[in-house]
Image (cartoon, grey):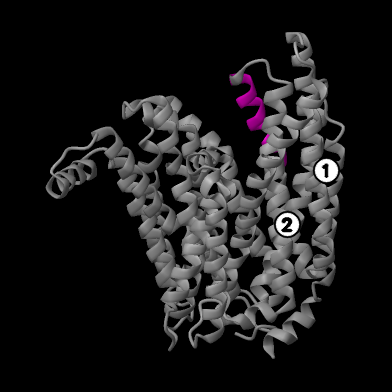
Amino acid sequence: MSESQGTRFPGAASILALVSLPIFIGALDLTVVSAVLPHVIYDLEIPLQSGLDNASWIVSGYLLTYAIAMAFMGRLSDIFGRRRIFLLALMIFALGSYLVAVADGWPTDLALRGYYLVASGRPDSSMMALTMIIVARMIQAFGAGAMVPVGMALVGDMYPMGARAKPLGVIAAIDTAGWVVGHLYGGIVVRFLDWRMIFWLNLPVCLIAFGLIAVALRKLPQERRADRMDWLGALLISMGLTALTLGLGGSGESGTTLMAVGTEIGHGIRWPLLILSLAFFAIFVLQQARSNHALMPIGLFRRRNLVDAGFANLLLGFSLFVAIVSVPLFINTLMAETIEQGAWDSGWMLSALTVPMALAAIPSGWLTDRLGYRWPSISGMILAVGGFTLMLQWNADSSYAVMASHLVITGIGFGLTITPIAAAVVNAADQAYRGSASALVILFRLVGMTIGVSSMTTYGLQRATRLSAALLQIGSSYEEMMRVGIQVAERVIHEMFLIAAAVCLLSLPQLIRLQRMKEARRRTDG
């Protein structure tokens, strides 16, 4: 198929729908456990404090493995074929789901026996069961993380360049919708059923999807390439991502749960971990420059659209996560009367941001196919800046209706932006490296979110401490302390909104630089 003038693969729309289903389930499981963690801890009879600290790895382990799988499984699909790798990823995800569901059964018994044989001791069975759940979740995440870049690369194979943005928007919307409704889905399931049912329910969906996708992709021309996998590069980027995630104390789309990881690590080794991550990434770049079978060829990063869209995606991830963290913080600190009310109000208020974001990603693809990358993405970022600016008016007396309208504007802005920058990255790569380029789309955003949650948490805590010290007098009354606390919280969160708006503005030069689709097409074909 010609990149520029090819025709759409027959049945592409049906294949897109089939591929989107397991991607949605994988994204759903990204956040679903946040609603069931207390149930897991209670069920395993683990003390609450130590349980929360250790159980945070059920979330963070998933996210870390999710990112690592993205980094090189897209490249594997370039070499061995999209169909093989997507189906393999789907089965790995299904296996992980099964192992999570039975983790405190035979896997724990087997691990206890093995531990006894090796160490001649018997560890705590509850903690061993928790460890098995964490391991199973990481297996599950490996499959889920691989499906996203391979699915995006499939779009590149099935659609000509001028028609890719809309299906890429569909995948972006499906992926976003999954992690958005994960909390709600988990809460509903555990209200009526055992928490294990979340993972049992994955199995029939995965098996049906496997059969249908295997048949649908049989005629897709994807032969095995005469190339080798760069396993050293895969190891280096995996180690770099691991050190970066642990050093920053969180990752991506998880929410504040992951800050427990940063607390466990402590500030003492944070900077060494960050320096180590930079070292791994530097070695990775040098190794890629010399490798004849590079995981991510340096030539990819000479493509202007890939670099500009990738950096814009990183900044988008930063700003998006500021909103995801700040909105619940604002509601719980300044508006909600109880923890339960705060959790409920935060959930549906965040949907005012994320649901429009997911929905806007689809028409954004249509606009991108007709207008190019530049104008939909610029318009989206300007809308997001406007939304954050309106959020500066929030106070403890604001109505939820007004706040929701501001979040809708911000969400539509982000949704209009994510599709064209994803299409720009995927279209910048030749077919031989389309899987690697697709992985970069999500990795850039995940790194931005990771930096966002770490830097804004540190900034918020330090800023609140300084403001409180400046405003409070020694011996202040309880009422005075409460008044100052509300004033400080409101000011700090407003400053975080302002920072998010400024970061969105920083992306505009990169978005303006995006080449028109015809120019990018000539560069790719050349």
Q: Name the side, left or right, on which 124 lies relative to 283.
A: left
Q: Taken as a whole, is the magenta stretch helix, strand or loop?
A: helix
Q: Percent x, y for residue 65?
A: 45, 56
Outermost residue, front side: 474
Q: Is residue 9 something one can see in this rendering?
A: no
Disc 1, SS: helix
Is residue 352 rendered magenta in the image?
yes
Say which residue appears at 58% left-offset and 50% top-offset: 248
Between 189 and 266, the residue placed more toward the observer is: 266
In three-dimensional space, the C-alpha distance between marks 1 and 2, rounded to whole angstroms, equals 14 Å
Image quarter of residue 425:
bottom right
In the image, the segment drawn in magenta is 340-353
Q: Position of residue 305 (x, y in %)?
A: 73, 74
* In magenta stretch: residue 477: no
Q: Residue at x 58, y 20 (%)?
A: 340
Give x and y (percent) for residue 396: 80, 22
Q: Is residue 159 visible?
A: yes
Mark 2 highlights which residue?
A: 315
Mark 2 crowd level (few <14, some 14–19, many ≥20, 10 Å Cα):
many
Point 67% across, 46% down: residue:
455
Quarter location, residue 282: bottom right
Count the labels in the image: 2
Residue placed most toward the observer, 492 or 336: 492
Mark on residue 498? 1
Q: Which badge, 1 or 2, comes first in the chain's sequence?
A: 2
Name the amino acid, label 1: Leu
For mark 2, give the secondary structure: helix
